[in-house]
Amino acid sequence: MYNNINKEIGQRIRKTRKANKLTLLEVAHKMGLSEGNVQRYEIGKIENFALSTLTKFAKVLNTTPEELLGWVDKEDVTNSFDYSYVDEPVSAGLPENINAIKNLPKIPIADVFMGKYARKQDILIMRVNGESMNKVISNGALIAVKTNIELSNITNGDIVVFTYNGEYAVKKYYDMDKFIMLRPSSNDLRFTDLIINKEDTNELRIIGKVVMYNIVLE
């Protein structure tokens, strides 16, 4: 006996499929399923609805798993806010203060993606350049950086954007008592830890903490 939750998800899949003017057969081909199986998903007759399958449906139907689950109202997705945007990679340099940040170009992002950081004035959107964090953040990904943050609110392992000796980068932050360690998270072993003695941290400036980033699947 199939449950009501799967039936509700199926109804959303069917509604979204029709809104995209896709047939059962077209969706089946894109999903790698039979037409009959897609139909069973739509009427809720599949007992075990795997998250991986839901994610595939969302991708094919140009929506999100959250929307198919009913966690997000379609109208809520359209609510967005304009954030300051650095139209250059991180390594190209950043504004020196929050006043300069406010004068940057703007980019709209839906509130649902920003979560608790939605509509925060101190959020800066920028693009990552390079492979030093590719285990976590891919080259070219967009990141949201909370700029108005105290060092006391940064914990070991947090990802930060920083400048040191005039160069900007994104790394994991660790306070190691006598020194600060900024560690890459990369499959490329050429990227190594940056160790800065605390007496030499005058040249280190933390721009902000990364609170969100996007992931683009190949």
Image: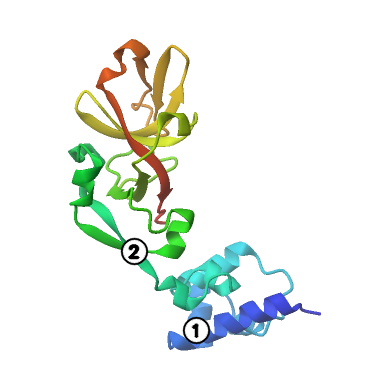
Residue at x 54% of width, y 66% of height: 55
Place of residue 52 in the rendered image (x, y in percent of width and height, measured from the top left) = 58, 62
Label 2 or label 1, whichever comes before in sequence order: 1
210 w.r.t. 180: above or below: below
Mark 2 residue type: Phe
Mark 1 residue type: Arg
Q: Which residue is mark 1?
A: 17
Residue 154 image label: none
Side (left or right) of 171 relative to 101: right
Disc 1 crowd, CA 10 A, few/some/many (<14, 14-19, 20+): many
Could you say whether the residue bearing mark 1 is in a helix, strand or loop? helix
Could you say whether the residue bearing mark 2 is in a helix, strand or loop? strand
Give the CA distance from mark 2 to mark 1: 28 Å
Residue at x 27% of width, y 42% of height: 129
Q: Is residue 32 visible?
A: no
81 w.r.t. 212: above or below: below
Place of residue 93 in the rendered image (x, y in percent of width and height, measured from the top left) = 19, 38
Place of residue 8 in the rendered image (x, y in percent of width and height, measured from the top left) = 65, 80
Disc 2 crowd, CA 10 A, few/some/many (<14, 14-19, 20+): some
- Of marks 2 and 1, the one in the foreground: 2
Q: Residue furthest front?
A: 99
Would you identify the image quadrant in which residue 83 lies?
Answer: bottom left
Would you identify the image quadrant in which residue 114 lies?
Answer: bottom left
Q: Which residue is mark 2?
A: 81
